[in-house]
Image (cartoon, rainbow, N blue to C red):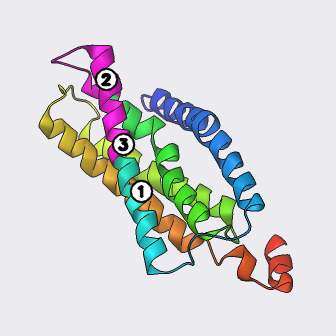
Amino acid sequence: MVLMPWVAGSAVATVFSAALLVAPAALALRRLIGRRPAVPLDRGRVERHLVLAAAVIGGIGAVAWADAIALVAGGWPQGSAELASSLLGFVAPVPLASVPWFAGEALSGASVRPWRSLLSAAAAASAASWAAYALCWAGGTHLLSPETGLIQLAASMVAALSAGQTYLATRGDQRARLPVAALALEDL
């Protein structure tokens, strides 16, 4: 029963971060994709590397924002590493998973399975973030330091790149390149 508050808290944080941070941007991106006449890039090595680069940049940004919020909330020099680690472990995974999804869908057009690939990437990022939190931060107090930042950065990179790879593996082909019969089968 000791884990129940942690499980409930992580579920609530994940749902709120998805609803408040990801959903509006996802709907705007879907609208943009539907209105533009052509995609900027074809799917290939360049697009794949840009998607993974976006995931890495998103991971760096997540660590920077979490540590900045912790410093503001906890003051300098001690800061609140627990707050930063909690933000990275429970609030950041879904927005972090959406970064490669946004990059891939914006750069190469709509996928056959856009929502499934986003949910798969979110599941991968959440599992990696929760595991990193459990391994690195559960049960201890830490001050914000360069060492803490490096651990957070490594954990964030694992979550971001696992989300990016999961998105790339599950998205399918470009929707515009498929014949109508294939799209009908996919919608079943």
Is 61 positioned to the left or the right of 9 in the image? left
Q: Main secondary structure of the magenta part?
A: helix
Q: Residues within 10 Å of mark 2 (few under 14, many from 20)?
A: many
158 horizontally vs 46: left or right: left
Q: Residue 143 at x, y = what percent?
A: 17, 25
Under circle 3, the secondary element is helix
Q: Where residue 186 sits in the image (x, y, percent)?
A: 79, 75
Q: Callout 2, which amino acid?
A: Ala
Q: Secondary structure at mark 1?
A: helix
Q: Position of residue 155 (x, y in %)?
A: 30, 49
The residue type indicated by label 1 comes to Ala
Asked whether 54 or 92 is in front, the reply is: 54
Q: Looking at the rendered structure, which numbered label has been put on residue 70?
A: 2
Name the residue at 42% across, 57% down: 54
Q: Which quarter of the figure has residue 101?
A: bottom right
Mark 1 and mark 3 residues within 8 Å of each other at the beta carbon? no
For the residues labelled 2 and 1, the Cα–Cα distance comes to 22 Å
The reply to whether dot 2 and dot 3 touch (C-beta < 8 Å) is no
Task: Give, as a three-letter code, the residue at label 3.
Answer: Gly
In the rendering, which numbered label is found on residue 55? 1
Q: Which residue is mark 3?
A: 61
Q: Residue at x 26, y 30 (%)?
A: 139
- Tell me whether circle 2 and circle 1 mark residues in contact (CB < 8 Å): no
Residue 33 placed where, x, y %? 71, 60
Residue at the far front: name it. Answer: 37
Among numbered discs 1 and 3, the one appearing first in the sequence: 1
Residue found 59% across the figure and 70% down from its top: 108
User: Which span is picked out in magenta?
Assistant: 60-83
In the picture, measured across the screen, residue 80 lies left or right of residue 29, that is left
Q: Is residue 71 found inside the magenta-colored segment of the image?
A: yes
